[in-house]
Amino acid sequence: MKIKPGFNLRQVGDEYIIVASGVENVDFTRIISLNESAAFLWKEVADREFTEEELTKLLLDQYETDEETVRNDVNVLTQAWLDAGIVER
């Protein structure tokens, strides 16, 4: 997977949001916000291809939690990113 060009992470106060740059990406009907963990992952893979396995490892290295929970969370997150059209396979 890879983040589509034109989507950037911005921090606004305590919130993280995905901002689209370029006319073709502008859709003012949706704001994509990320929690701290998702923002951490976005920053880590912003300029390269990645797999769900890599995201899982990043979270396991960063947080004290079990692998099954992380795998499930990563699966849900990547599907949400795909559904939102901000990443591509």
Image: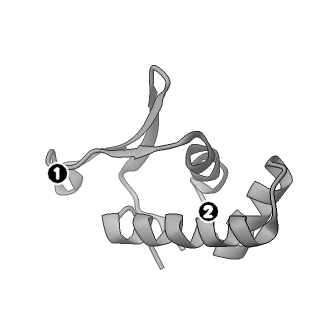
Question: Looking at the image, which is closer to me, 23 or 40?
Answer: 40
Q: Is residue 27 visible?
A: yes
- Above or below, 66 relative to 53: above
Figure quadrant of residue 60: bottom right
The structure residue drawn at horizontal position 61% and vertical position 67%, both measured from the top left corner, is 74
Q: Which of disc 2 and disc 1 is earlier in sequence?
A: 1
Q: Is residue 49 visible?
A: no
- Above or below, 69 relative to 8: below
Amino acid, disc 2:
Arg
Residue at which label 1 appears = 27
Task: Identify the element where label 1 is drawn.
Answer: loop
Look at the image and tell me in which quarter the N terminus lies: bottom right
Q: Position of residue 71 (x, y in %)?
A: 68, 72
Task: Identify the element where label 2 is drawn.
Answer: loop
- Above or below, 56 relative to 20: below
Residue 84 placement, left or right of 11: left
Residue at which label 2 appears = 48
- Label 1 CA crowd tier, 10 Å (few <14, some 14–19, many 20+): few
Nearer to us of marks 1 and 2 is 1
The structure residue drawn at horizontal position 81% and vertical position 56%, both measured from the top left corner, is 65
Q: Are marks 1 and 2 in contact (CB under 8 Å)?
A: no
Q: Position of residue 47 (x, y in %)?
A: 58, 56
Question: Looking at the image, which is closer to me, 81 or 64?
Answer: 64
Q: Position of residue 76 (x, y in %)?
A: 51, 69
Distance from label 1 to label 2 (Cα)? 24 Å
